[in-house]
Amino acid sequence: MPETRLVAFDLDDTLAPSKSPMNPRMSQLLADLLKVVPVCIISGGQFAQFKMQAIDNLPDAGSTNLDRLHLMPTCGTQYFRFENDEWTQIYAENLTDDEKSRALASVEARAKELGLWESETWGDILEDRGSQITFSALGQSAPVPAKQAWDPTGEKKNRLREAVAGDIPDLEVRSGGSTSVDITRKGIDKAYGMKKLAELTGIPLDDMLFIGDRLDENGNDYPVKALGVRCLAVEDWEDTARLVADLIPKLAAAAV
Ligand SMILES: [Mg+2]
């Protein structure tokens, strides 16, 4: 069996329930795992989500080896490490000004043309997240029931996605959450992030283990499996907790 020198996790529905904080049991297990091996968390979400769901719920820096934790928001187009007692962005591969302005112009024009530019909204419809432009039909902070009612079949989002993709073929246009369309560089997925991680840490992909809840062919963790990284599939954080509890003594024994 190959050596495991780093364990990488998906965030949503792997370490924590979707968009929710990590359970204290999972936090403790993650801290225990960090005593034996470096850990990465990789997700399509933003750093703020990592903070709310995972980082803010970890035991404090004094008792956790935060220096061994690698954070890769937005699939590794951003990279954060714990340096000088704070979470520090090491790099962010942002869209260029030209890419941003073409993306913003297209999504606004197409949404208006298709009758999808709503007047009753909760917060901004368009958001510049640096490495990603996000369109949220009802605004950033729309209540969940309103979001669910807006496009239950996904038909509106798909029409918008297709129209925008035609305007900016050099960029990736994806359906995001229930009301959102995301625009990023092409070819950015978790496999991209894992390759970056191997470069940054000097740990080969063969010596990594990845744990995620969507390793099925349509899932957002699948690109990691397709890359050839050893993967373990879980259903939810409780599944992950069992697996990590089992893994810790094995890795500790291997490290001796
Ligand atoms: Mg997930």
Image (spheres, grey):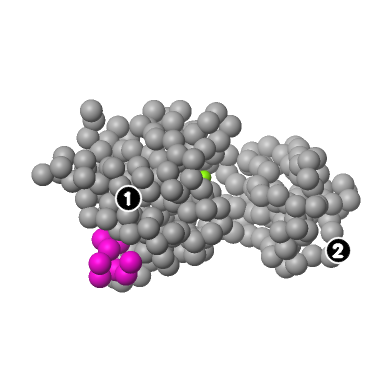
Is residue 250 left or right of 126 when viewed as pictured?
left
Residue 202 forms part of the magenta stretch: no
Tell me the mark number nearer the camera, choosing from 1 and 2: 1
The segment highlighted magenta reads 59-66
Taking depth in this image into account, of 154 and 13 the one nearest to the observer is 13
* Disc 1 target residue: 39
Classify mark 2: helix, strand or loop: loop
- Residue 103 visible at all: no
Q: Identify the residue shown where x is 66% and y is 49%.
A: 177
Taking depth in this image into account, of 144 and 49 the one nearest to the observer is 144
In the image, residue 11 lies at what x, y percent? 47, 50
* Disc 2 target residue: 119
Q: Identify the residue shown where x is 28% and y is 42%.
A: 247
Disc 2 marks which amino acid? Answer: Ser
> Mark 1 or 2 closer to N-term?
1
Taking depth in this image into account, of 149 and 163 the one nearest to the observer is 149
User: Split into 4 quadrants, where in the image is the N terminus?
Assistant: top left
